[in-house]
Amino acid sequence: MNRLIHGVLSNRLLIMVLAVLVMAAGWGSYRQLPVDAFPDVSPNLVQVFTVTEGLAPEEIEKYVTFPVEVAMNGLPGITEIRSVSNFGLSVVNVYFEDDIDIYFARQVVGERLQEAREQIPEGFGDPEMGPISTGMGLILFYYIEDTTGRYTLEELRTIQDWIVKFQLQTVPGVTEVLGIGGWEKQFHVEVDPMALLRYDVSLTAVINAIHANNLNVGAQFLERNSEEIVVRSVGLATGIPDLKRVVIKTVDGTPVFLADLAEIRIGGAIRRGLQTHNGVEEVVAGQVVKLFGTNSSTVIGAVEEKLEEVNDILPEGVRIVPYYQQKALVEAAVRTVTTALLVGIALVALVLLIFMGGMRASAVVAFSIPFSVLAAFIGMHLIGLSANLMSFGGLAIAIGMMVDGTIVMVENIDRMLRKAKKGESRLEIIARAGSEVARPILFAISIIVIVFLPLFTLQGVEGKTFRPLAYTVAMAMFGSLIYALLVSPVMAWMLMRRPKIGHTSFSDRVVAALNRPYEPLVRFFVRHRGVAVTLACVLLAVGVLILPQLGSEF
């Protein structure tokens, strides 16, 4: 440690340049940190959805869910598989270990899905993976307002699904836009049973004819006079008139059209939910889902800009109205912790000014706070930790501890400067003072970090909640150790001077005033050690008795 302190003081300019670079890198890292309200405690999950057409849950479980579950068994890093089979829908949740990359997990699931598709009977649906998001991915909710009253819910849902959704999905960081409410526009073919009997046509024949006649077919090209003429059959239905002209069968050369067998109209798909505005009127709404691992604030800002553009191209009287933004929650959480940080820094600076013996010594100690915080930002950026309530909360907890090592260093330097002989080199005094306390500072800060080590071993929801706090405390304390051992001796050489002989500072008078009642109290307990031990045991027992009555919650 002696050689370290002497080396630091011999390269003062280099140390200060490195300190400035660390703080600049910390500020740059802070600007790049993803910002969230809370740590994402969602499990490492890949969902597989299979939509079927009206099958019972028992059939879905047997013919859809079971083949998908069997195909997923044996994947690397998998922890468990859960499934739900509902009427018309199969959902298989594949859980992976937390350290498995989500894109790797989706890759291996996608490979196994091909095996599952081969085992699912035809007509029972096609399994697909859900969006790359988590429970914290719903970042913005909105509804579509029609101020004119001219548009039906079907038309508003069409605007949502074919204009708003496609525009918002072009925003970087958006993985899905979900539509809610209204009616999904459909062509309804309502077959008349008596007409089927009259024309001797089965319902299956009607369905097959609609499928066969509702498509475009390419027929390559014809060559005429060295010119290629593209040939194609255009049969895709674009409206009710096209569907009415679909030929179901021919009787003695006379075609039987779909219009002869059924009534065709525009209607809405079957739904099991709706969206209302203030519980009064039904509206069409949407939810924006962000991509896993993206910065919530950045994505929300980009979505808001895109919403302004989309509002300009919507029909007159129709506009998008956001009613929930995760950005407000994120900003409130970050603002709360930032305020706590600033208040903590101000209080620490005030205490330092009162007790450290002047502005110069207080400044040396106070500078350890921004240095340590910015150093922690570098670590957060390197390990991919987001700025959230828990990670910033760790910095707030560590505010008072960040200055401990530097206080010890500066106090010893101040003491040695007071005791120094006339003519003795100030640089040598600081080097000797720093060497005396360097090892205790290292041990003290290491013990503080070790206290938080159990938090690193937490798994599951608890680990995802509290590990960010432990990481930021450990990184901030590591930054404070670097400052205390490397930067503070140089700062002390730059700012601290020998006190005048016989001069008594304000802090000296404050400490003397506090020592007057404290010193006899200490002497009393030293002489009556039994009283001190008994008092400590009583306080411990009271704490143990109160602990079960405090209650607990997550």
Image (cartoon, rainbow, N blue to C red):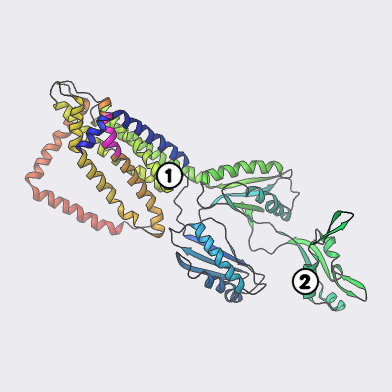
- Residue drawn at (39%, 50%), measured in percent from left and top? 468
Q: Is residue 554 visible?
A: no
Q: Mark 1 is on which residue type? A: His
Callout 1 environment at 10 Å: few (<14), some (14 to 19), or many (20+)? some
Quarter placement of the N terminus: top left
Q: Tag 1's secondary structure? A: helix
- Residue furthest to the left: 527
Percent position of residue 195, x then y:
85, 75
From this view, report whether residue 410 is shown above or below residue 299: above
Magenta-colored stretch includes residue 483: yes
Q: Is residue 397 left or right of residue 159?
A: left
Q: What residue range appears in magenta? A: 482-491
- Write down the residue under mark 2: 207
- Residue drawn at (9%, 48%), measured in percent from left and top? 529
Corner quadrant of residue 454: bottom left
Q: Is residue 425 visible?
A: yes
Magenta-colored stretch includes residue 512: no
